[in-house]
Structures are given as structure tokens and as C-alpha cells.
Image: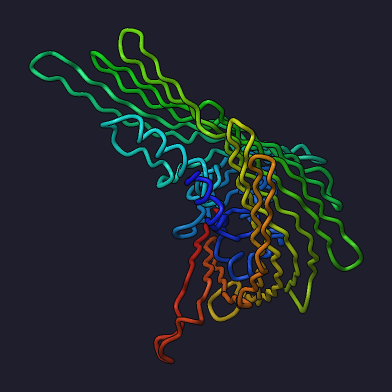
Amino acid sequence: MLKRLILLCMVTVFSVSAQFHPYNSRMESLAETYIIDDINDVIRYAAYMKNYENDLQVTFTSPIIGIKSIEDKFRIGFIGNRGLMLSQQVTENFYSTAIPFVDSAIQYIPDISISNQWIPHALFGIDVGVFSLGFDLFLEYARSSYSQENPDTIETKASASIHNPGFLASLIYGEKVQIAAKFGLAAPRISGKLESASLETEAESDKGLYLEFGGEAGIPIRSVKLSLGADFILERYAFLFENTIIPQTVTRDTSDEFTNTRTALYAGVSGNVFTDGLWAAQYALNITGHTSKAGNDDWVRTTSIFHIFSVCLEKGWDKLWVLDKVYARGGMRLNLETPLTSNENSEVKTKTKSQTNFSQIIPTVGIGICKGIFTLDLNINLNQWDHLVTGPGVSKVTAGLMF
């Protein structure tokens, strides 16, 4: 009961970033208007590797992307610092539930907080002309163990592990009108075990599923491009506890079944402006939810709905000073949040809809420079402009190399 009351009161959203992915400095400067073509797209659809040949892009504290072209049709690459695939956008997520469940059942084991780790992904792409394939492969894994042996030769062993192997496959079809689709699958599991002369305890996943699919369309209409897309992520997990007092006394228990969902629907337009410039406007609807369902079919669900509006502008200049290219970028973003809570207990249904919260309009600005094979993008935080001489602070830096 206490757990359900806590769930009712918890804020469900950890981050409102559209698409639930990290961004490089250019996209941050353009108010996260991700319908614009950028190498950051390979995080969403690996098949977009076809647009990049030999590129390395390092965003400090955020994504690192490397792509290598092999005989024009093939691409290999990696993504680093993207975070874990399982949800951390909701307060009650796989890691915050699974790790305490095992820790409370299995004594002695060291920390297995995989949520603090950043595990790279491997990328593979094939471009056969009219369509392209991309594959994002990952294995998120952590393990710890403990053993003790005393003079009486009574040995105690404890171990725990988390693993989440999976893939995200994507396809892009067409040239002028481009259609993209993706499908991802993973099997998150946690397990812990304690063994001694008189006791054996196991705590492990009873269910574990990660499912992701989505689609995106880019349609040219006169002088602009219309972009439409949708993403859906489902995570479902439950846990099992078994305690055996040797030789035969067995205690078994199961947790509630938990479900996390993340949905994004977005639409926008983009086009060229000035000389060597672009503009874009985008709307995204993001919905995150967490459901806890007990064995008696009582359930509690917390949901947050976000409306995200963004506009941006980018202008480039050739041969400015000693630089080959200079870009000025700016944009604005507005977030609207509506928290919802619903539960069903003993045939009593309760729904609560809180007021919609309007965030401040968030202005963004940045610059980019190119010299030969090197690029440097800065997302500038004008809010940290303390003194005229020292200038504003920089919130994100991305360095690129086209080799």
C-alpha cells in the first residue's frame, strides 16, 4: 500500500527532451529541432549513416559518434555516451526498481548500479541506392561478486548481474520523398544469488522486455520539407524471489508487474533562407507513463504529457577571416507539461489531472566554425554572461573531424 501511495505522488518525468536522446552542440543551439539533417540522427535511425562517410564527432559529456565508409556502400561506426537504452525518463524505472529488489534479498554483494555507466554501441550500415539499412547493436552488462571462507571451511558466495542485449534496426527508402522505419528489441534481466551451507537465496527477473518501433517521413512541398514521425517504446518487467533453507523449506514471492511507455509524435517544416541558411519549426507531443500492476489486478498508472514547440535559424558564411566556414545559430523552445494519475483498486477507479505547467520560453544560441577537416560547434549560455570582457559561458562543445 505504501508503495502505491508513493507512486501516486511521484513526478513521472525525469527529462522532457524530445525523442529521449542526447544532442550535440549544434542541435542544442537549434532548440533541439531534430527534423533538421544532422549526424545526431544516427542515434535515432542508424540507417542515416548513409549520409556520412568518414566522420568523428565528439560532444563533451554527451554523444560521441564515429562513422567509417567502406567502399561507398558499407558503413561501420559507434556511438558513445548516449546513456542506457532502458527508461530513465520516468522516476520508477527498471534500474531504480530492480537494483533495490536484488540488494534487499542478497546480502554482501557490491554495488551493481549499472545506471551510472555509459556503454558504447556498435553501428553497421548498408547503402544499396534506393534504400539503406542500419543496425545499432548493444550489450549493457554489469556483474559483481563476493565470497568468504572462515576457518571452519564454511563458504559463503554471493553474486549479482544485469544484462540487456539488444538491437535497433532501421530502414530508409526513397530519395526525394524519404520514408524511414525502425524496430528494436532487447531482453533486460537482473539476477542475484546467495549460497551458504544452510541457505540459498535467489532474486531475479521474472519478466523482461524492451520494444521500440517508429517511423519518419520527409516530404518536399514546393520550397519546404514537411517532416512527420512517431516513436514508441515499451518496457515491461517483474521480479521473482526464492529463499531455500536447506534441505527443503522454500519461500517464493513475486513482485508487481511494471510497465513503462514512452511515446513521441512530431511534425515540422524546414527550408532554406538567405544565402546558405536554413530555418525550421517543429511540434512534438511526448507522453511518458509508468504502471504498477499487482497480482490481484489492482493497478496504478502515472503519466505526463508534454507539448514541445521549437523554432530555429542557421546562417553560414564562406571564407570569413582565416576560417573556411562560420555559422550563427539560434532558436527558441517552449514546453507544456500535464501530469495525470489513475488507479483501480477493488473496483474503485480514480483519475487525477493536474494543471498544465508552462515552462519559460527557452532561447538558444550558438556558433560553428570549419577549417579544413576540423569543425567546432559551441552552444552558448548567455545567461552566464557575468562580465562584458569575459563573455558568456559555453554549455556544450562539439568537435568534429572529417578524415
Please say whether residue 71 is visible from this viewpoint: no
Q: Is residue 401 left or right of residue 146?
A: right
Q: Is residue 345 above or below residue 158?
A: below
Q: Nearer the viewer, residue 187 or 181?
A: 187
In this orientation, does residue 251 appear? yes
* Coordinates of residue 160 in the picture (x, y in percent): 36, 29
| Residue at image coords 68%, 61% | 353
Q: Judge from the rendering whether residue 83 lies leftward or rightward of residue 312; answer left or right.
A: left
Q: Is residue 252 left or right of residue 249?
A: right
Residue 311 image-quadrant placement: bottom right
Horizontal and vertical percent position of residue 34: 68, 60
Q: Residue at x 49, y 67 (%)?
A: 396
- Which residue is at the far bottom? 388
Q: With respect to residue 336, does 195 lie above or below? A: above
Residue 337 quadrant: bottom right
Q: Residue furthest right?
A: 222
Q: Farthest residue toward the left? A: 151
